[in-house]
């Protein structure tokens, strides 16, 4: 029997609790408490409400919930305590078909895990796509998490329980995230292209203009055509650009060539997209979610022949990670007219000049730059730029929240530095007369943590730290380090930087040590445009999720487009604490579906605005 | 006209001040204030009193004193402001014979130094031996000190001014530290033996049982014979042992073979000494001062045919630094019966087994061990063990004090550790959810400093510190480090260790990171024997210097002898902040003289005790 939200909202609290029986293993108290929050307008809102009940429960209740679960492939599989759902899920993941060796390994892992943490290992074995993880994936995850910290492992178990509950609720409500699943598959398909030396090891690396990179461009272009874009092209820098025209001729990149008579009536376009290149051994979703999500929306519009009162231009940017050339945002930079001609003379690590790589040496420098200059967009032809991106951070994951609205892309400054004290004998130099370079830095580190935390949304990091040639019995005479300081506005960042440097100076003076500091990078903050951020907020509200606003700590293509038009971003939750630039980067079919829902809502709301 | 302390003590304050005119350049206020401290029983006491006046003066007065000095090889050399003393000293150091290039270099250094610090560079150009530094030495010192910290450079200038004053006072009082100068020369002569690969670069490295090491033993043995020791031998481990008999037959190492009838009347010996091996590119005084000082005393006794009511056995230990084999205190360990037979099977870095190196493979293991066992001393034959050593730390240098009485050789514990947190994106991970391994260690570092300082004489050091593969934009997931914790008693050390580890545990729990800690060394403290420490105190008092007691942060041979007999040590000030295990290790002819004076006083006092 299929359940509906209408039924759930209409039932008594006890009846409603009974209707949700089995969602959380032997823990009806969760549904019962969540039912006080009715009515729920969306399934996403119900899921979030239940996760909140668990988050606010006592540690004893949380442990009780975890311990209500059977061991993976454990003896409990044949005992009374295993629910039908658990049996079904474990069997779907192939755990009922373990080899003797795999079974033994899992028993050992179960024992070790229980000995370390005092509760059973919980894994949503149906995984982010709902089709079931492989036994190899399950064992690898088990081994990795066995090394985790107990505080982290506890909430990671709860997050897996929420994912199990999510899949069970989808089944109960017969509401499958079909578009999200398809989007997940698009990413999987695109990740088949990887550079030599990585592909063989199952690693994803797509470096600018390699064969794998070009194959990605071809696949994205082909998929754009399938989606029903009116024009699809791969430009000279490798950007894949798809245009879906408005309900009348829209002013897109080709508008410069449009007859004067038409120009007035032509409508502006919404620009959106993100990058398809990756870091070495990176994740499958970083960047790619940002063009696949609007492509899916266009496909849905095109399916029903629907046109909006504005064009949609989706760009899959060819380069953002800066892995091959030290040319930051070269792809999106071309659209804003900030492509630096000097970049063409840069050599990659194999000595290949960018100009030869791009133009095979057949173009004059001027012809090459003319071709690139042609890519520059006229901002008056656009409504603005929006970008969907996987969060690449732990915030949404920790909050059990699938979507977040970005307030600003943080401005950042980076330094490399060194503190120079006096190396001396660790036994014979009294504490009071030391000039310990590392102890000076330690004091700065403690200060930086509290200073950044005071802002709430600033971050300050010492990522590189070393006492060169340090000895166990020598007071450090030198300490080399890096600083990375970020904040949502330039003013907030600069105040942070000033305080940190003033503190460094004061610490060094008091300790009679000296320091050097070299600024290696400075990037301006890109605050979201208020109107566009409000549009994302309205779009997310329609999904039934609470609105959570957050800065983006990482840089994105939107940062570049920010220089010529209003922009705002939407974040989609990442699994595994939001890890990114790592093969563990992951997000679920359900979160992708919510991203599509929000984007489609944004388009619909915008269409309404334009019609009014 | 030669001045005497009697004259000085008898004069009025103004007259006395006038008698000391020129001691401190254009700064009669120093002598004037010091004269309030009269009477002075020794020249050392006068020198110390004047240095104290300067130490307690205002910074303005100190800067005035420094600025009263001419530039080195500067234009002032021919101007009115240069005192006759200054001209004499600079000329003695050959600065009046500079080549054009050297002169230009010195002018540049003068300008750079003045620009950085705001005062002229001060160097006691007559150096630690009073004969004048070479122009090369002067320029090298200038270049090194130009990189110093202003706070340090200020007191280093004052210390050089005190050394200039010391030499001037010696001249004024016609009291030259002749034995100290000769002792200084003995060290210089011994430092001519250095291992291949070091000697060519002017570096001192004497590794156990190399040709240079054996040449050192021969030179020490020859000098012992010249000094008038009754017996001199180099034992199978390379220890050079000199015995100076008492006024009747003494019970020395050979006492075991002494006829029963003689044994009762035989007198005990005082055991003393230190090591002659060095670390790589080490200093000339580390260890060597500990056997040369008593050798000089024996020579003085022998010169006048004087015997004491106890024997004196001086041992130049062959190995203490543990550079060739991992056999700590193998030489002094043989005297205490703690030579570990397993050490004989150890290979050095060239694969040479210790047993083959020592016995050329001709001895059976048992024969070899028998020979080593024969070196064991019977503690009932000895009064105790005393050791003179260069401080190897900055304490006496900072206090302008030539001698210090050691209260204890600190007990120590060492650890290697690692903090394991979670690497994450430095931009996207909020401060509150980080598990930063290096920040956790930084917090421990700050705690360790204040915890050790609380004890006053404990020390705690993080000498090795590294974030492996750290990146500027990644929150550190790992941090490796070392701990070195020392205190004058085992109980104090253990309390320190317990607090530090408890704090590490608490920090790691609060920050949800984990740690590993491996103990790599634990050495018990060796508190000085009260009676022997009192004897050193009485001996130092006779030099007119104030008594300063201090723990030894470094390990010494006395630590090993401590296991079988009472011991106490005397420290002699080191120049250059007491730097050791470094070619900059240095001490002066005057400080060496005071060390000899104190040792001779100890012998005389002990003789009186025995006679009573």
Image (cartoon, coloured by chain):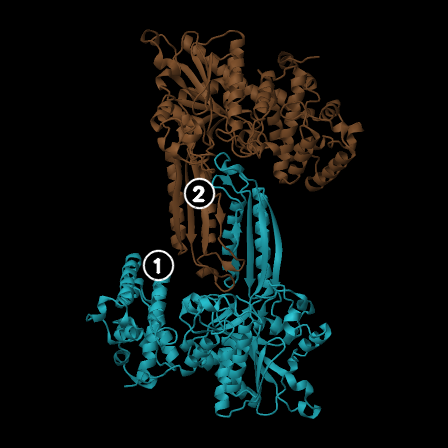
Chain colours: A cyan, B brown
Q: Quadrant of the N terminus of chain B?
A: top right
* Residue that extends furthest to the left in the rendered view of this protein: A80
Measured from the top left, where is residue B459 in percent x and y? 46, 37
Residue B161 lies left or right of residue B213; in this view the side is right
Residue B483 badge = 2
Q: Quadrant of the C terminus of chain B?
A: top left
Considering the numbered disc 2 on the image, is that residue within a helix, a strand or a loop? strand
Measured from the top left, where is residue A228 in percent x and y? 52, 88
Q: Residue at x 69, y 91 (%)?
A: A259
Q: Chain of mark 1?
A: A
Measured from the top left, where is residue B564 in percent x and y? 36, 23
**Residue B438 can be seen in this image:** yes
Q: Specify few, some or many for label 2: CA neighbours under 10 Å numbering under 14, 14-19, or 20 or more.
A: many
Q: Chain of mark 2?
A: B
Considering the numbered disc 1 on the image, is that residue within a helix, a strand or a loop? helix
Look at mark 1 in the image and give the residue it sits on: A150
Rendered image quadrant of residue A107: bottom left
Number of dots carrying numbers: 2
Q: Are marks 2 and 1 on the same chain?
A: no
Q: Specify few, some or many for label 1: CA neighbours under 10 Å numbering under 14, 14-19, or 20 or more.
A: some
Q: Is residue A124 placed above or below A172 in the rendered structure?
A: above
Measured from the top left, where is residue B182 in percent x and y? 59, 18
Query: Distance between the Cα atoms at labels 2 and 1?
Result: 26 Å
Rendered image quadrant of residue B237: top left
Q: Residue at x 62, y 54 (%)?
A: A518
Q: Is residue B299 placed above or below B463 in the rendered structure?
A: above
* Residue that extends furthest to the right in the rendered view of this protein: B79
**Residue A533 can be seen in this image:** no
Residue A466 badge = none
Q: Nearer the viewer, residue B323 or A395?
A: B323
Q: Could you tell me if the residues under marks 2 and 1 are in contact, i.e. CB atoms within 8 Å? A: no
């Amino acid at each position: 029997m299929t359940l509906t939200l209408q039924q759930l909202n209409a039932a008594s609290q006890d009846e409603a609790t009974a209707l949700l029986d089995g969602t959380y293993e032997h823990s009806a108290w969760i549904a019962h408490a969540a039912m006080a929050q009715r009515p729920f307008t969306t399934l996403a809102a119900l899921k979030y409400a239940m996760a909140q009940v668990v988050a606010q429960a006592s540690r004893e209740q949380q442990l009780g919930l975890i311990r209500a679960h059977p061991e993976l492939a454990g003896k409990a599989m044949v005992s009374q305590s295993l629910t039908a759902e658990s049996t079904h899920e474990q069997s779907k993941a192939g755990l009922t078909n373990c080899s003797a060796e795999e079974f033994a390994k899992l028993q050992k892992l179960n024992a070790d895990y229980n000995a370390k943490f005092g509760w059973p290992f919980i894994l949503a074995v149906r995984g982010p796509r709902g089709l079931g993880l492989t036994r190899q994936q399950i064992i690898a995850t088990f081994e990795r998490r066995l090394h985790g910290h107990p505080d982290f492992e506890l909430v990671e178990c709860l997050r897996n329980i929420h994912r199990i509950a999510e899949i069970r609720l989808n089944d109960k409500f017969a509401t499958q995230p079909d578009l999200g699943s398809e989007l997940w598959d698009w990413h999987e398909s695109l990740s088949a292209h990887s550079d030599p030396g990585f592909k063989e090891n199952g690693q994803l690396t797509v470096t600018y203009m390699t064969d794998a990179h070009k194959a990605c461009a071809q696949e994205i272009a082909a998929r754009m055509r399938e989606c029903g874009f009116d024009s699809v092209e791969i430009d000279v820098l490798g950007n894949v650009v798809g245009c879906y025209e408005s309900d009348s001729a829209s002013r897109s990149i080709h508008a410069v060539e449009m007859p004067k008579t038409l120009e007035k009536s032509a409508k502006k376009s919404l620009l959106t997209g993100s990058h398809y290149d990756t870091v070495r051994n990176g994740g499958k979703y970083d960047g790619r979610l940002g063009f696949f999500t609007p492509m899916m929306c266009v496909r849905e519009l095109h399916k029903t022949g629907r046109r909006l009162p504005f064009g949609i231009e989706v760009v899959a940017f060819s380069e953002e990670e800066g892995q091959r050339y030290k040319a930051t945002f070269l792809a999106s930079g071309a659209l804003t007219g900030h492509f630096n001609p000097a970049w063409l003379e840069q050599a990659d690590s194999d000595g290949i000049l960018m100009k030869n790589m791009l133009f095979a040496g057949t173009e004059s420098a001027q012809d090459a730059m003319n071709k690139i200059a042609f890519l520059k967009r006229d901002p008056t032809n656009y409504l603005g730029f929006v970008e969907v991106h996987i969060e690449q951070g732990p915030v949404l994951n920790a909050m059990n929240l699938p979507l977040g609205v970005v307030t600003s892309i943080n401005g950042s400054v980076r330094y490399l530095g060194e503190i120079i004290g006096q190396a001396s004998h660790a036994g014979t130099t009294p504490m009071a007369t030391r000039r310990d370079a590392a102890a000076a830095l330690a004091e700065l580190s403690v200060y930086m943590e509290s200073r950044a935390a005071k802002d709430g949304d600033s971050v300050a990091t010492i990522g590189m730290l070393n006492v060169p040639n340090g000895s166990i019995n020598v007071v450090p005479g030198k300490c080399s380090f890096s600083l990375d300081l970020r904040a949502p506005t330039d003013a907030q960042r600069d105040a942070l930087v000033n305080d940190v440097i003033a503190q460094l100076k004061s610490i060094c003076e008091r300790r009679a040590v000296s320091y050097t500091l070299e600024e290696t990078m400075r990037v301006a903050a890109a605050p979201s445009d208020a109107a566009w951020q409000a549009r994302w907020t309205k779009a997310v509200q329609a999904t039934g999720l609470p609105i959570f606003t957050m800065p983006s700590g990482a840089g994105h293509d939107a940062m570049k487009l920010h220089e010529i038009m209003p922009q705002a971003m939407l974040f989609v939750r990442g699994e595994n604490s939001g890890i990114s630039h790592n093969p563990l980067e992951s997000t679920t079919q359900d979160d992708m579906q919510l991203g599509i829902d929000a984007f489609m809502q944004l388009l619909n709301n915008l269409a309404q605005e334009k019609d009014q």
